[in-house]
Image (spheres, rainbow, N blue to C red):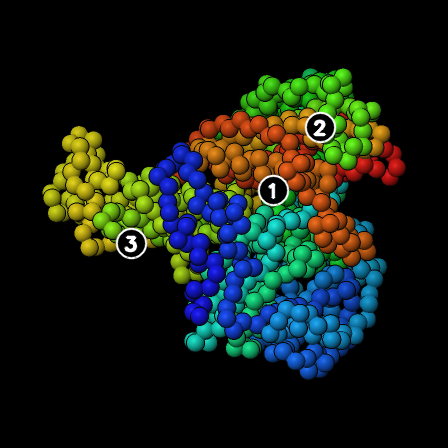
Amino acid sequence: MSARTIAGQKNLQDINQASKDGIGGSPLRPDGILKVKGEFAYSSDLWHEDMLWGMALRSPHPRAKIIGVDISEALKTPGVYAVMTHEDIPGAKFYGLEIRDQPALAIDKVRYHGEAIALVAADHPETARRAVKKIKVEYEVLTPITTEEQCLDPETYGYVHEPHEYKSHGYGNICHEQKLVSGLGVTDEVRALADVIVSGEYEVGMQDQAFLGPESGLAVPAEDGGIDLYIATQWLHVDREQMAPVLGLPEEKVRLTLAGVGGAFGGREDISMQIHACLLALRTGKPVKIVYARDESFFGHVHRHPAKMRYEHGATRDGKLVFADCRIVLDGGAYASASPAVVGNAASLGHGPYVIPNVKMHAIALYSNNPSCGAMRGFGAVQAAFGYESQMDKLAEALGMDPVELRQLNAMSEGDYMPTGQQIDSPAPVAELLQRVKDMPLPPPLDLTDLDVRQLPGALSNTSHGEGIVRGIGYSVGIKNVGFSEGFDDYSTARVRLEVIGGEPVAMVHTAMAEVGQGGITVHAQIARTELGVEQVTIHPANTEVGSAGSTSASRQTYMTGGAVKLAAEAVKQALIEKGRKRYGWTQTDLDLVGGKVVSESGGALVSMVDLLGDEAIDLTREHHHRPTQAFDKETGQGFGHVQYTFCANRAVVDVDVELGLVKVVELTAAQDVGKALNPLSVVGQIQGGCTQALGLAVMEEIIVKDGKVRNASFTDYLIPTILDTPPIPVDVLELPDPNAPYGLRGVGEAPTVSATPSIVAAIRQATGIALNRIPVRPEHLTGTL
């Protein structure tokens, strides 16, 4: 069997059945029916007729020295083809998303619970599992460094990474830090200008992306000595950049093709099993498949940074903000991953979507022996939003003001300046979004005389018949950047081909964009259909044969890769029109492609695209770069750091059983400015999905880590919202075009995850009167049993 006929390619025939809608329509997702029916081929379904199965031995300790590794018994196991340790790596030992500080296999120490130490390739997954258990590792177990106090006192507790190990990261156990000062900063003189000052300390637990498709992929050795990897990922080209040096291969010999992705949310932005599968395939000369079990998935990818935050806000008697003094400490875990960028977001967005004359901010990410943390939907802004929105409610109470009115009074708008000194030069309808959610109809009040217990907190558990049930309403608003920031040259590449197939013009779009469920392939077809005036559009498999599309993260793909598809399609259109000018001598300046024809507004249809193209094809590639950004000054945080901002407001209605501490979110309303809804149905789906993930963080989702060890690495003990937990989510979509963006669009996917969590907690506070300062909110927080 050829490596290119493996499962996963089956989807292309269905995906290429393009619908007829262009920009502004809501065509059915070509992968949607397959996924609903369970017929979509994910990366875990990949198969090769002579493949082996790979598996890793992982550390049971969060911090230990490795004294020795004995693989002899594992090698004797029948069916085992290879056992590898770091000594068998042919190239570089380290990789990393931003800082190359993570060993492909542990060398002389382990730094977190679950770190990979050795690899096995065998003819059956059970054989591989038995062999892994036969590997003997002698450890000198060390006390893990897990708390902020321990991290910031390396002289007493030690270093996660010794100071001499890396030159590129921070100092001590600080991975990265960013300071920010605007206005006069926060001095005694500034504080004296405030009539009311409120402060608070807030904590955010470690959330997991909890995608349903575990990490998996298939590595196939090639005849040229290279490797072909079929993988579920978020960024094909950066995977390759990290992999090639470790494999000891030039990048052109490391070829990646996107396989079916079962969710991502940031958790697939880092390397997981990619290097391991390729190492084993190159060692054995056979295809190697790796599929993580669910517990291994919890160890094998990064999580959302847990955070501890301190905020102080001052305001005048009439509610105008005077200052904000903020400190955000993020636990980055054992390796850097995306921590530097997460810190940059937390620092630059941590004041919220408010005009504050004087701001002081200090954000840091720590190295610890806790699990590594990196990208997750909302990326630094989520943690900060819980802090500053909790403060807004506390300040409103101190002033005796309506919490929505206080927010609107201080809301930023177009023309205002961020504390970074960057002017907001596109619509920022913060006050309007808040008003929209406030004005939307409320759900019917709780009627205890005609009670359906299935609608109460506890649902079908029959825990209550209305006793102790109290309703609360809360509001919040958030800000999130779009795209890569701080001077990163963010770009995406698209190739568009136009030719005649079966007697009609057909466009083909080829990008390296990772379709992780966001609907990018649908939008790309819509863009090509709109720009080229054709009905049939096919989507080429995403791979590294075309230029980078960047990561499917930062709410950037429709903006960046959609922008690249638009540029490439426009270039193809102009090339076709020029072909017609040369052939027919057209002089009109109002030529366009509509309905498979070249048309002139003044003269109507001129020629069919089929006749003009003939047997020739037009095939062009273009790159889309967003406008340049700047790195923030390390001490002042000043700089044009972000290309675009997006805003979402929420209203949450909750019922709380104050006796049992159970919470039911009755409704979670959202209003968001999306610039331009290229696919309105998908936009609403993205907003509802983001709100649901925020609900999970508010009341149920947390990885429990004790002394560096993960205690709930399963979906039995790590709870995520199901359809029974998810309330109605009415969505009000506002379309105020951004003049700097393709079609005026604005990134959609992350803003509701930033903004929705604080509204849920605010509603619980209103219902209970308890000053909640930690998420997720647990029953014991509400019943006083903690």
Q: Which mark is residue 520?
A: none
Q: Nearer the viewer, residue 695 or 68?
A: 695
Specify which label sits upstream in the sequence, 3 or 2: 2
Dot 2: what SS? helix
Q: Measure how far apart labels 2 and 1 are at the Cα level.
A: 31 Å
**Which residue is at the far right?**
785
Instruction: Tell me the quarter of the picture where residue 64 sits.
Output: bottom right
Which one is in front in this view, the residue at disc 3 or the one at disc 2?
2
* Mark 3, residue position: 619
Q: Is residue 500 above or below residue 669?
A: below
Q: Measure how far apart labels 3 and 1 are at the Cα level.
A: 37 Å
Task: Name the residue: 70% across, 72% down.
Answer: 130
The three-letter amino acid code for the residue at tag 2 is Gln
Where in the figure is residue 417, as x and y percent of width and height? 55, 31
Q: Is residue 707 left or right of residue 342?
A: right
Which one is in front in this view, the residue at disc 3 or the one at disc 1?
3
* Mark 1, residue position: 378
Where in the figure is residue 486, as x and y percent of width and height? 54, 47
* Mark 2, residue position: 455
Q: Residues within 10 Å of mark 3 (few under 14, many from 20)?
A: some
Q: Measure how far apart labels 3 and 2 are at the Cα level.
A: 57 Å
Task: Name the residue: 49% across, 41% down.
Answer: 643
Q: Quadrant of the C terminus?
A: top right
Q: Is residue 274 above or below residue 670?
A: below
Q: Residues within 10 Å of mark 2 (few under 14, many from 20)?
A: some
